[in-house]
Amino acid sequence: MRALIVSIVVVGFACDSTQPEKTAEKTAVKTATPEQVATPEKPATPPPEAKSAQIEKLPAIDCKRPEEHGPVHLTAEQLVNRNGTGVTTLAAFNTSMERPVEVCDVGGSNQWLIASRCADGSAPIKTGLDAMTARQGSVGAGGRCGSILDHYKVACPEAAHDVYIDMYMCPEGTSFR
């Protein structure tokens, strides 16, 4: 019984269902203009290999959402070209509000974070609970489609990496209901 209660508390925390003040804050951010949305401090200049990975312009996509607050539906070609696909070394990939990692759903966020590695090859995030602990919160609209982004602070021996994730870039037919 105690494990069930802990599970319910953890699930409630992960969904922000126990924090109504954050819901109001998210609603206010959605209605804000891009000029009104605060931008985080710029991270240190990434190493040259990271710059080359980021210079490539991402192709435009259709940002229509079949459901209000739901995912953006991507074609199979767009899915394999999402920002952050195939990247595993955090030091070689600099995310931002403008260029977040693009995944589908919380599970996709956790998978990407668990697969990520520090410069020395160590895994800073090993479980979904580690990912939840590293999550700093929702930080407002960003990315190619203006989705609400999640911010994670991932600690590595070389640095603490700010990772921004857009979890609304999903295969066609995906629903969050």
Image (spheres, grey):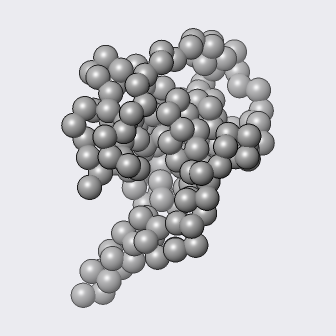
Q: Nearer the viewer, residue 3 or 34?
A: 34
Residue 125: x and y in percent read 48, 49
Give residue 173's quadrant in the image.
Answer: top left
Is residue 54 or residue 33 the one in the foreground?
A: 33
Q: Position of residue 98 (x, y in %)?
A: 62, 32
Tell me the residue at 54%/38% (across/down).
Answer: 146
User: What number of labels is visible?
Assistant: 0
Picture quadrant of residue 11: bottom left
On the image, the x and y values in percent for residue 4 come to: 27, 80
Please give the name of the residue rendered at 40% of the width and 54% of the height, measured from the top-left corner.
127
Q: Is residue 176 visible?
A: yes
Instruction: List the single residue furthest toward the bottom.
Output: 1
Q: Residue at x 29, y 22 (%)?
A: 75
| Vertical relation: 38 (above or below) 15 | above
Q: Residue furthest left?
A: 173
For the C terminus, the quadrant is: bottom left
With respect to residue 176, does 115 lie above or below? above
Q: Position of residue 100 (x, y in %)?
A: 55, 34
Q: Quadrant of the N terminus?
A: bottom left
Residue placed most toward the observer, 115 or 162: 162
- Whether residue 114 is visible to the viewer of this picture, yes or no, is no
Q: Is residue 133 above or below residue 53?
A: below
Residue shown at the point (43%, 31%) measured from the top left:
63
